[in-house]
Image: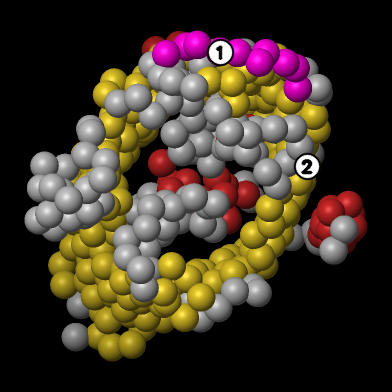
Amino acid sequence: MNSYLRYLSVLFFFCLCTTHTLYSQNMTSLIYTEDTSFVSNEVRELRLRFRNMNFFRDNEYKGSLVKGYTLPGLWILPSVSYQPLRTLKIEAGAYMLRYWGESKYPNTHYVNLPEYETAGNGVQSSFHAVPFFRVHYAPLPGVSLVLGNIYGRNNHGLIEPLYNKEMVMTSDPESGVQFLWNTRHLNLDMWVNWESFIFQEDSRQEEFTFGVSSRIKTNSLLSENNNFHCYIPLQILFKHQGGEINTTASERSVKTWINAAAGIGLDVKMPFRYLRKMNIEVDAAYYAQQKGSTFPFDKGYGLYGRLLADIGDFDIKAGYWQCHNFVSLMGDPLFGSISMSGKNLVYNNPKTAFLSLEYSHSIGKGFALGVHADVYNTFKCDVSQYATNVETHDSKTYIPNSVSFIAGIYLKTDFGFLLKRF
């Protein structure tokens, strides 16, 4: 299908959605994230739960940062849970991912698309499938310890330069350990996602990500007016590759990278019928290559700002990003200095402005629909080639202004029912 026809079809569906009069919620909470609340009144209940997302996302990337691609498919997560205590819940199931038009999947741990780390030569048929197991312990109000499959991906609430929202369609559920702490003045999410485990004399490297995402809420320090909520976001991603027992690996050098962000944000309740809330946030982002020589520079930084308006059934977001020598380890490829499509190509001080329109609503209990259309304008920028980890560039040239279009339709399901009470 022609790329423009695909984009127009998404916009047509978008317009149809405006005829609904049901109450709309934020697309992040309805589509991209998972509820972490602990239901204490389900003690000694065996329950069946079914989670699913059907998606069609079209990335019409322009310029030379990344090539465009489409994600048509679904994932399903059936599970069984049992809560022996008011503070303890155990859940087991299987996560299965399928892209339409494909029936063979590498037997690997999916980290992102289009790249992934190969974990073997085998393939899986029909679905890419991995086991799912979670233990959620809540010893105190607002405090949770999660082992196994944690509340990951977009639940961390990271900004786009640090984490790409579409990984909810391309990556496996995160696995490791997580600590959650939510109080009146602080939201804290601290986790380890173990992405690659190795055995003695393995040919691969072990790989894990340590992260911290926090929000300090300063209302009581500034004002008692509930119409204004000021907060300070602090975010860190620490990514490591290495291992001491992988003696047969072709690459055994230790590699360590850091992405971090800090800023200030403000939520404002608006006194209008259709303009209900506005949010503004500005963040300074940081990148560091502490060990290794994978990337051509060891340090970089960026500035990210966004304005979000909740207008009736829609969310409108506008933002701006500029950076210098910034490597987005797990973020949207449009928010980095290194091209994913041009070999050894570096954008020098890239600048991007973006506009996003989202519509989402709850169809019924356990069912939600989301539609979005995004425009990213990457301004004219000089680029250069690099050959080593030292900042030695040649063949300097310019990439003209480019406009990328991204659109998607999502239908998410999350419901459960009681099997037996003990």
Prevailing secondary structure class for the magenta stretch in the rendered image = strand
On screen, residue 63 versus residue 205, left or right, reads: right
Question: At 30% across and 51% down in the image, what residue appears?
Answer: 195
Secondary element under disc 1, as helix, strand or loop, is strand
Disc 1 marks a residue whose amino acid type is His
Report the mark closest to the observer, 2 or 1. 1
- Image location of residue 118, percent across then percent down: 37, 58
Instruction: Report, in whole angstroms, how far the alpha carbon at label 2 lies from the one at label 1.
Output: 30 Å
Q: Residue 103: image x %, image y %?
A: 55, 78
* Residue 262, image quadrant: top left
Local crowd size for mark 2, using a 10 Å CA cut-off: few (<14), some (14–19), many (≥20): many
Which residue type does callout 2 highlight? Answer: Phe
121 versus 345 height, above or below:
below
Image x and y of residue 399, in percent = 75, 22
Q: Is residue 360 left or right of residue 4?
A: left
Per the image, the residue denoted by label 2 is: 405
Q: Which residue is mark 1?
A: 393
User: Which quarter of the rendered picture does the C terminus lie within?
Assistant: bottom left
Q: How is the image coloured?
A: secondary structure
| Residue at (34% x, 54% y) in the render | 174
What residue range appears in magenta?
Answer: 390-399
